Each structure stands twice: as structure tokens, then as C-alpha cells.
Image (cartoon, rainbow, N blue to C red):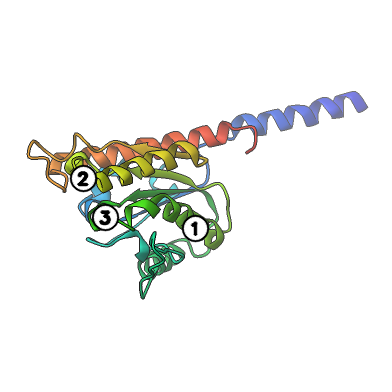
Amino acid sequence: MKTLKILFVLFFIFATSAQASWRDGVHLFILSGQSNMVGLDADKYFTPIVEKVFGPRNVIVVKYAYAGMPICFWDKSWMSLYGEVFPNQGVLYDILMDRVFQAIDGIEISTVSFVWMQGETDALLGDGFAQVYEISLIHLMSQLKTNLGRNDIGVIIGRISDYGKSDPYWEIVRYEQVHFAEHYPNTLWVNTDDLNGRTNDPHLTDRGYRRLGKRFAKRAIRLIRSQWRSPNN
């Protein structure tokens, strides 16, 4: 009888585990950045893709972006290479997080994905700004982890396009975005070099935004799936 009870318990555990899926639960996607994130219509080009995988009831997408702003308006700890600071640092981050907390109020969240498309302004501002971009990304992620109370946030970085490749500071930001993505846990980056048209505009084309939304969604789904398979989760 004791053996039968043990077998029954083992069977129950196995059956419950087999039913568990990386798609289960409510998945939060936070999208932010400057003008190229503003231009991305998430309702058309991002949300339908993740809803197809997880189900409309299991997806919360919060987007807040503001054109022309350097990362210091998200990073509250920002300081230029020469010790400069700005008034109202982090003000856009606070607005973003207010919207996030309103959206998830009373809801248990299974995963959080942070999608970031920003950096053009820091590259154009140049000396003193570009060199601290990766440090600011680290600060920003620390803020998110603290405010959301979790260390398992997936991060997807949109590398700024090749618009300003002749500018060394533009290249510094591009390098730091990739370096961050390749060394920070649970992070991927997305290429946008082919999304800004034949004229190599600083902003993406309509087709480019459609493709960007798809790339962001696929990377986020990939991170969620890989995280669920991790032995640490």
C-alpha cells in the first residue's frame, strides 16, 4: 500500500510538471525609448505576435516613448563622463513605471520583458554622453529590478541604425549597446541597419517599423522560452 501511495504521488508530480508550459501565466512587455520607439505601432506590429503565442488574456503591453531624449531622462543615476548631471533625470522613467503599475495592479506576473529602442540622441550629443551609455543601461536595469522586485527581467535592445556610422560617438553607442546585450544576463539585441531605407534616414521606414516590431516580439518570446528551460528557474 505504501509503495502504491508513493507511485501515485510521483505520477501526480510528473503529470503536473508535464502540463506546465513556458506560455503559462501573464507576461508583461514594457516598451520604451525615443523617436524610433515612438514610430513603432506596438498594437499592430508587436502585440499581435506575442498574443498569438501566449493568448490575448495572458499579455500586457505597456509602451511609453518620447522623441529626442537622451537616456538620462530614464536613468536617475546618470552622470556624464565629465561629472555633469541634468535636472529632472529619470522623469520619463517615472511616467513609464506609473503606467506599468497601473496596468499590472492586482495581477500576478509570470515574466517581464523590457524592450528598448533609444540612443540616437546620446550619440548625437557626443563627447561625454556616448561614453557612459552602457553604464546608463546598467543603471536602468537596476532601477527596473528594484521597482518590480525581480531579477529575471528579459531585455531586448534595438541597436541604433547605421545612420551616423561616420561619427565616432555614434559608433561608440552602437558598440556599447551590443556589448551590454552580449554580457548582461538574459539580454538580446536587434539589428536595425536594414530598416531605415535607402536614404539611410535616422528614422525607420513604415516597413522598417513593421519588421522591427516582429524582431522585438520574436526575441522576447525566445528569451521567455529559454528562461523557462533554465535549470535555475
Q: For the point 89% across and 24% down, which residue is it?
A: 3
Disc 1 from disc 2: Cα separation: 31 Å
Residue 146: give x, y in percent of width and height.
56, 60
Q: For the point 35% across and 65% down, which residue is it?
A: 73
Whether label 3 touches label 2, CB < 8 Å: yes
Q: Residue furthest right?
A: 2
Q: Earlier in the sequence, mark 3 or mark 2?
A: 3
User: For the residue labelled by badge 3, is the local secondary structure a helix, a strand or a loop?
Assistant: loop
Q: Which residue is mark 1?
A: 144
Q: Earlier in the sequence, mark 1 or mark 2?
A: 1
Report the side of 126 relative to 196 (left or right): right
- Is residue 52 visible in this depiction of the protein? no
Disc 1 from disc 3: Cα separation: 26 Å
Of badges 1 and 2, the one in the foreground is: 2
Report the side of 187 relative to 172 (left or right): right
Q: For the point 48% across and 52% down, which residue is it?
A: 138
**Which quarter of the image is occupied by the C terminus?**
top right
Q: Earlier in the sequence, mark 1 or mark 3?
A: 3
Q: Which residue is mark 2?
A: 167
Q: For the point 13% across and 43% down, which residue is it?
A: 205
Residue 34 lies in quadrant: bottom left
Residue 128 lies in quadrant: bottom left
Q: Which residue is mark 3?
A: 126
Disc 3 from disc 2: Cα separation: 9 Å
Residue 173 numbered mark, or none: none
